[in-house]
């Protein structure tokens, strides 16, 4: 089975297991990302459809805030192309055998399995993560290691992509992973349109740190927003970290600290990520000349473009073009 939905007929089917005590925010993230109409894409049919499913006729959400009824049972996972497992706070309590069986059989038949926040505990308990890389919320990292020592836990990152298994670190990181899945399935242009509708960052690399020291700047003049907007309009220019620091009127060391504190990444990593995202959009819009894509995105050479694109997407430029570029006679997004 294809891990992306762009190669199959009809929408990509997403099932979301809502277990007893599940966090409602993460269920909302899944339905917002994959279950709602996307008129901003201008497409004739939806690319995803979502089904919630539960192990019992009624399940209480986290802290009994409300109960969910009237949705399909766990048999719904058998039709899913992707299974999403949200988190819950009582992670040391074993999952119901029926839930673990649903996760195992979904993965065994080749579907993609995704966890949000502490949903990674369920994937590990089902035995899917042994010997594999994964992440979970930093607050639960020590407990995760004690319960599941065979998993290669990466507690500091936003999300981990192991191909058929994807894990997100926290509730907000679930949005990052969801947009990453949009980008992986349908390319940067469509993912960017979805992120703009959500008013959420379109491209935060999974390797960025979960915990940022200061999500909001203490004083307005420390905000990186104006600098980021300025740089995004000049990606084709030979911008360096020193150029960014000069524009912000700070030293490179101070700029580095601000990027770490506010974005959880480095200036160079952010700049490279933005350039790769721009290169992807140019290819999707039909530009086939690699030297032109490299120049307009600021990546310099076709060789550097190939290396960066493969590292970011796992695809060569030609493979990326075949998968996400416009077909003959097909209109491209403005």
Image: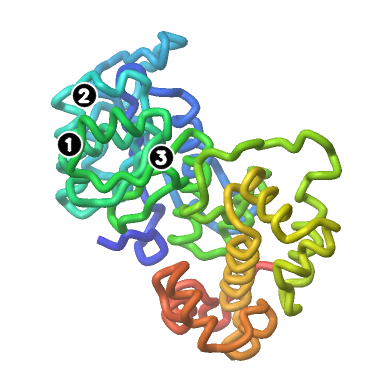
Instruction: Indicate which disc, 2 or 1, sits on the residue closer to the N terminus.
Output: 2
> Dividing the picture into quarters, in which one does residue 220 lie?
top right
User: Which residue is denoted by mark 1 in the rendering?
Assistant: 126
Measure the C-alpha gap from mark 1 to mark 3: 23 Å
**Secondary structure category for the residue under label 2:** loop
Q: Secondary structure at mark 3?
A: strand
Q: Nearer the viewer, mark 3 or mark 2?
A: 2
**Residue designated by label 3:** 50
- Secondary element type, mark 1: loop
Q: Is residue 292 left or right of residue 126?
A: right
Instruction: Give the percent coordinates (x, y) of residue 310.
Output: 43, 75
Task: Indicate left or right for 142 with 281 as reference.
Answer: left
Contact check, label 2 and label 1, Cβ < 8 Å: yes
From the image, which quarter does the N terminus lie in?
Answer: bottom left
Work out which quarter of the rendered image holds the C terminus and state it: bottom right
Q: Residue at x 43, y 80 (%)?
A: 316
**Image location of residue 292, percent across then percent down:** 65, 88
Task: Tell which of 90 and 285 is nearer to you.
Answer: 90
Point out which mark residue 95 bears: 2
């Amino acid at each position: 089975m294809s891990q992306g939905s762009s190669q199959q007929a009809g929408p990509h089917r997403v099932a979301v297991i809502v277990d007893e005590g599940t966090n409602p925010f993460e269920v909302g993230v899944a339905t917002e990302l994959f279950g709602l109409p996307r008129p901003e894409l201008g497409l004739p049919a939806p690319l995803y459809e979502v089904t919630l499913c539960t192990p019992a006729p009624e399940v209480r959400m986290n802290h009994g805030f409300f109960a969910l009824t009237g949705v399909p049972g766990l048999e719904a996972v058998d039709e899913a192309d992707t299974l999403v497992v949200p988190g819950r706070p009582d992670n040391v309590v074993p999952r119901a055998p029926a839930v673990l069986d649903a996760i195992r059989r979904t993965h065994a038949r080749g579907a993609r399995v995704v966890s949000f926040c502490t949903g990674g505990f369920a994937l590990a308990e089902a035995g899917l993560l042994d010997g594999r890389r994964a992440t979970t919320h930093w607050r639960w990292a020590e407990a995760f290691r004690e319960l599941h020592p065979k998993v290669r836990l990466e507690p500091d990152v936003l999300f981990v992509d192991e191909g058929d298994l994807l894990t997100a670190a926290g509730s907000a990181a679930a949005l990052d992973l969801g947009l990453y899945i949009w980008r992986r399935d349908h390319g940067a242009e469509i993912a960017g349109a979805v992120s703009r509708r959500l008013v959420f960052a379109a491209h935060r690399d999974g390797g960025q740190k979960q915990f940022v020291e200061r999500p909001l700047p203490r004083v307005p003049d420390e905000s990186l927003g104006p600098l980021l907007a300025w740089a995004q309009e000049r990606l084709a220019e030979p911008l360096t970290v020193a150029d960014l620091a000069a524009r912000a009127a700070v030293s490179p060391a101070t700029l580095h600290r601000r990027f770490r504190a506010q974005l959880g990444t480095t200036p160079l990593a952010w700049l490279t990520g933005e350039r790769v995202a721009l290169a992807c959009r140019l290819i999707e819009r039909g530009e086939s000349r690699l030297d032109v894509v490299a120049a307009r995105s600021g990546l310099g050479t076709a060789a550097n473009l190939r290396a960066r694109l493969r590292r970011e997407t796992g695809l060569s430029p030609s493979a990326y073009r075949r998968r996400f570029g416009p077909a003959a006679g097909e209109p491209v997004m403005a």
